[in-house]
Amino acid sequence: QVQLVESGGGLVQAGGSLKLTCSVSGSASSLSTMGWYRQAPGKQRELVATVTGHTTRNYADSVKGRFTISRTTNWRTIFLQMNSLKPEDTAVYYCNYKRLTIDSWGQGTQVTVSS
């Protein structure tokens, strides 16, 4: 099993930036896919961005050009740099780890963007 710890959420004005961090411990693999999902009140959880290995990245259309996902060389920590934030980015952001039969979630971190 793996454990995920997230940090970096908060309150920011529209147009501002935040950086989220997620670290994985336990029986994790460098071949895993890690990423960020978000859930706004009354909405379903949706993909924000994922990274597989160090170079294969996937972004939701709504965040392309504004958000950047990256991974440390020891592959156990990912970051989500969020720029040009909009009020519609307000949500709880969850870190996710996937590898074979393992699909684990972090506890979530609140991101609130004020207009």
Image: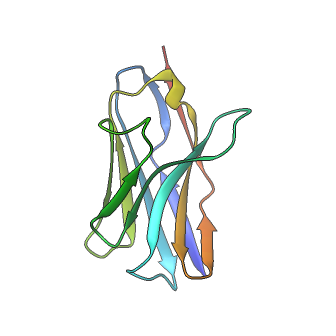
Which quadrant would residue 60 be assigned to in this image?
Answer: top left
Residue under the point 32% across and 33% down = 83
In this rendering, the answer to whether 93 lies above or below 1 is: above
Residue 27 screen position, x and y as percent? 52, 86
Which quadrant would residue 62 be assigned to in this image?
Answer: top left
Residue under the point 60% across and 50% down = 108
- In the image, taking residue 9 as reference, residue 91 lies left or right, namely right
Residue under the point 61% across and 71% down = 103
Residue under the point 27% across and 66% down = 55
In this rendering, the answer to whether 96 lies above or below 94 is: below
Residue 13 screen position, x and y as percent? 42, 20
- Identity of the residue furthest to the right in this view: 42
Foreground: 65 or 79? 65
- Identity of the residue furthest to the top in this view: 115
- Identity of the residue furthest to the front in this view: 61
Residue 26 screen position, x and y as percent? 52, 82
- In the image, taking residue 96 as reference, residue 71 lies left or right, namely left
Residue 88 screen position, x and y as percent? 53, 25
The figure's colour scheme reads rainbow
In this rendering, the answer to whether 40 lies above or below 70 is: above
In this rendering, the answer to whether 33 lies above or below 110 is: below
- Identity of the residue furthest to the bottom in this view: 27
